[in-house]
Image: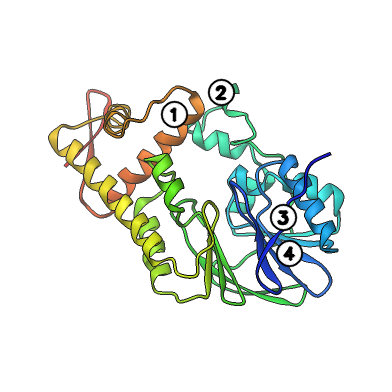
Amino acid sequence: MAASYSPTFVKPDVGYFPGSVNVGIVRGKTGAILIDSGLDAQTAKKIKKGLDEISQPLRAIVQTHAHADHFGGNAYLLSVYPDTVVYAPPLEEAVIRNPILEPIYLNMGATPLAELKNKFLLAEASRVDHLLPEEGEVEIDGVSLQTISLPGHSWQQVGIVVEQICFAADSYFGSETLKKHKLPFLVDAYETLQSLHKLLDTNYEGYLPGHGPFETSTRQTIHENISTHQHLMAKIEALLKAEERTIEQGLAAICSSLEVSLESVSSYVLYRTAFMGYLVGLQREQRISYRFANNQLLWGC
């Protein structure tokens, strides 16, 4: 029997299930609203027991973005609570309904290698009943939720604000997570920085990232995220200024510089996508450019 874990409430009706991936919870008029659902069925079973302990049937799941560790619990929860309504942002919902798209895009559009079909990159499929506005208000089970557009880590990622508590998804990482990954996953460093500055202009009563602790003031953590991204962009720019490189050469160089060891296909495709996201950000800022030579795509300054 899976062990339960109880939600931590930061307001009478707003809280979260803590874990390696935080899952938000809001008490509605007739039951619970989850913000994301965690990695897999094992996590979802713990959430189910936690909901039982506080006598809250599940009424809705609100997805912040379509990465497997944030919607992998949907399939189990929907099997237990079949009337649950699922909300997700545009584009992200396509991946939630067709999760094979995640390993496909990580494999550059080709048929995914078998090693990429693991629970961290390939969740079970979930239906999506309603699209979330990228910026706006949505009422679910009598509760008003505000969506804020926070792209960069994923294409159309949104944050969810309820009663002045901001569920910030993966727009920023807690300090320990940031240090652990060294080259944080993102698809566009430019958009990531825009989203971080957007959060700096807010003044909510509390913030919860997808990975990291709840904080009532997150300015220091967000500044740490901004500094990390800016430092990585400067480091990559310097590498390309010294020598034009292909994506493979640039990835190998930055990983060596950061003392990152790529020893599996999964880590390779995640770091490669992140590296490409930094290249895209630098190119959008007109700090680097690319050209073709000898049948190679070369990046340089």
Point out the frontmost of discs 1 and 3: 1
Expressed as whole percent of the image width and height from the top left, the position of residue 13 reads: 71, 72
Labels 4 and 1: the sequence-earlier one: 4
Give the residue type at disc 1.
Answer: Tyr
Whole-angstrom CA distance, mark 4 to mark 2, is 36 Å
Q: Quadrant of residue 271?
A: top left
Give the residue type at disc 2.
Answer: Leu
Dot label at residue 268: 1
Give the residue type at disc 3.
Answer: Val
Q: Residues within 10 Å of mark 3 (few under 14, many from 20)?
A: some
Residue located beneath label 3 in the image = 128
Disc 4 is placed on an element classified as strand
Residue located beneath label 4 in the image = 33
In percent of the image, x 73 and y 56: which residue is there?
6
Q: Residues within 10 Å of mark 1 (few under 14, many from 20)?
A: some
Give the answer, above or below, for where 273 lies relative to 145: above
